[in-house]
Amino acid sequence: MWKKLLLAASGSCLLLAANAPVATAQEGLKTLKVGLWGDQFYSKDAAIKAARTSQTIDSMNAHHLDFTMYAGDTKNGSSECSDKAIGEDIISVYNRLDMPTLYTLGDNEWTDCHRTSNGAYDPLERLAYLRNTFFSKSTTQGKNPIAVERQGEPGKAYSENSRFIASNVGFVALAVTGSNNNLVVTEKQCAKKSERSAEDCAAASEEYKARNAKNIEWLRQSFSAAKKEKLAGLAIIIQADIFFPFELSDGGYDDDFMKNLDDKNGYTDFFKTLISETRNYDGQVVLINGDSHFFKMDKPMYNPDGQLTANFTRVQVFGSEDNSWIEMTVNPNSENVFTFAPVMLN
């Protein structure tokens, strides 16, 4: 059962109504303001990191957002994966925001923690820690949380996959991470910057296979519910930039990107499912991702006739040394449903 939120047409208060009927246009659906961010808190200079964090938080609070969506990576890829770095410090950040945050995990929090620079942690142990720390309740992050549906038992496997409905739009978090989604297919991938054994890498790939199946299930269920409830749109947040490093124009989509979607690519099942589900859905779909630290809004999906898939948009958040963020306006009564405005911070 999707968690559904009734939002008053005036005011910014989120009223929990887990089993309430989906509102209709005649009931005065509220236009939502949502902050999109990720790949933050990267600086190795503590003072700079603190200043950037405060600037981003203050900016978001000043915009009176309904909620934010965080696209993973809560530290840089070369620092230690301690409980404090990936847990306590991030909880304190979310709790400084006036609004709740829907958080999806990134590779820097667990997948890449095997790196010697990260402390040579066991990534599967770090994943279990994150699940228990951030997803042990059926609510978002933050001091003012809202209810979500979790795929797995709270705090356990796949509890990071979550979703809710607000203003007749679905918001979905999926655990699709960088570093090939934890699928290890070459010896170089296994040993790079790491002392992992072959057994460790085999365990990583097994973890990928199990989670990938659950991700596909969650994605399909979300589209099925969106069609049944006649939702105006779906906003899906993942961490990985599944299109990197391909240039998609001038034939690059078909000739390079799509041909790269094979059994060695950890995003093949996800994107092929996303294609089929989007084409069979009348509403608008936006895929939000991080990973590449470069703001981008494009339409990287094509139909068999060579035309762009009109109801699909991808938005990539800022990151790394740039702590800017994106304000997404969600108007379920508009043709495009989702519009985007970068909020530049200096």
Image (spheres, rainbow, N blue to C red):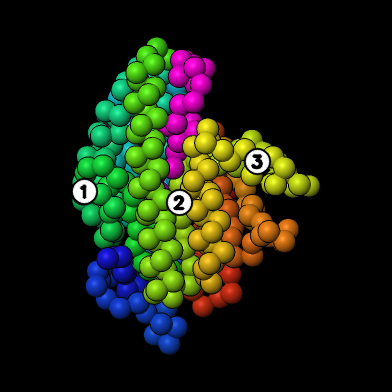
Q: State which tag comes first along the sequence, 1 or 3.
A: 1
Q: In the rendering, at what x and y percent does residue 307 appear?
A: 72, 61
**Residue at the disc numbered 2:** 237
- Which of the labelled discs sits on residue 259, or is there none? 3
- Name the side, left or right, on which 7 lies relative to 152: right
Q: In the rendering, at what x and y percent does residue 295 appear?
A: 60, 45
Q: Quadrant of residue 115?
A: top left
What residue span does the magenta drawing correspond to?
A: 173-193
- Which of the labelled discs sits on residue 215, or is there none? none
Q: Quadrant of the N terminus?
A: bottom left
Vertical placement of residue 196 versus 247, above or below: above
Vertical placement of residue 222 versus 60, above or below: below
Q: In the current view of this chain or complex, which residue is farthest to the top? A: 195
Q: Amino acid at mark 3?
A: Lys
Q: In the current view of this chain or complex, which residue is farthest to the bottom? A: 26
Count neighbours of disc 3 (C-alpha within 10 A) and say few if under 14, some if 14 to 19, many if 20 or more: few
**Between 300 and 57, the one nearer to me in the picture:** 300
Count neighbours of disc 1 (C-alpha within 10 A) and say few if under 14, some if 14 to 19, many if 20 or more: some
Residue at image position (58%, 69%) is 336
Q: In the rendering, at what x and y percent does residue 174 appear?
A: 40, 49
Q: Kindly report the distance in space between the C-alpha atoms of the residues bearing marks 2 and 1.
A: 19 Å
Q: Secondary structure at mark 1?
A: loop
